[in-house]
Amino acid sequence: IIQDKKIDSKIVVSLERISEAFRVLLWDESKKNSLSPIQIQILIFLLFHSKDHCKVSYLAKEFNMTKATISDSIKALHRKELIKKESDTKDTRSYTISLTNKGMVIARQSSIFTKPLEKTLESMDSTKKEVILDGLLNLIASLNKAEVITIQRMCTTCNNYLFSNNSHYCKLLELELKTNELRIDCPEHAIKEL
């Protein structure tokens, strides 16, 4: 079997196994709350992101889904009184989505569904963790560049990021960053100009 011989294939299969663990944890969390996995992900997203990212079109890009699929989830969350819609004063067809108090409680509880994965990493040597993080950030950036995945708000895809002399630097913060300080979801992200 080719996946037993090539390291690239072994890495891909390993990532698939980790993805499977993520899916199982997300599914368990969604069952606890009688929600679908994407509904849980939307609630968690709303908890951690600014209003300008909390619109159907942005969520569709974020989760690589159609606007119709996201709209269905938004309607279900609205019926369950977990979110509220605020009309856009400039565009009556558009609205911003935010959490209700009930939605906030579920989002906060659900946001730690990956704890078992994090717990497993805790015992790993910090140098190994930095190598893994660096490799994953590069993989994500490459997949983004190849248009396999969409929106990425991480340092390496930001206009404020510089990599020089084997060191990371943020022009916005005017600060040199260690590998473990690189962000994977930065609120100040500015898409890198080509």
Image (spheres, grey):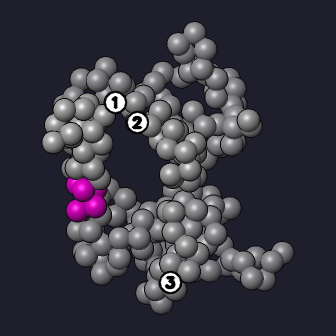
Q: Where the C terminus falls, by quadrant?
A: top right
At numbered mark 3, what does the secondary structure look like: helix, strand or loop? Answer: helix
Q: Which amino acid does the dot numbered 3 rest on? A: Asp
Residue at which label 2 appears: 136
State the separation of the CA atoms marked 2 and 1. 6 Å
Residue at which label 1 appears: 132
Q: Is residue 65 left or right of residue 93?
A: left
The answer to which quarter of the image holds residue 90 is bottom right
From the top left corner, tell me how far across and down residue 170 is, in percent: 64, 26
Residues at circles 3 and 1 in contact by the CB criterion of under 8 Å: no
State the separation of the CA atoms marked 3 and 2. 32 Å
Residue at which label 3 appears: 72
Identify whether 172 is placed above or below 79: above
The tag on residue 108 is: none
Could you tell me what secondary structure mostly forms the magenta stretch? Answer: helix
- Which badge, 3 or 1, is on the more N-terminal residue? 3
Q: Which amino acid does the dot numbered 2 rest on? A: Leu
- Which badge, 3 or 2, is on the more N-terminal residue? 3
Which range of residues does the magenta coloring cover? Answer: 20-24
At numbered mark 2, what does the secondary structure look like: helix, strand or loop? Answer: helix
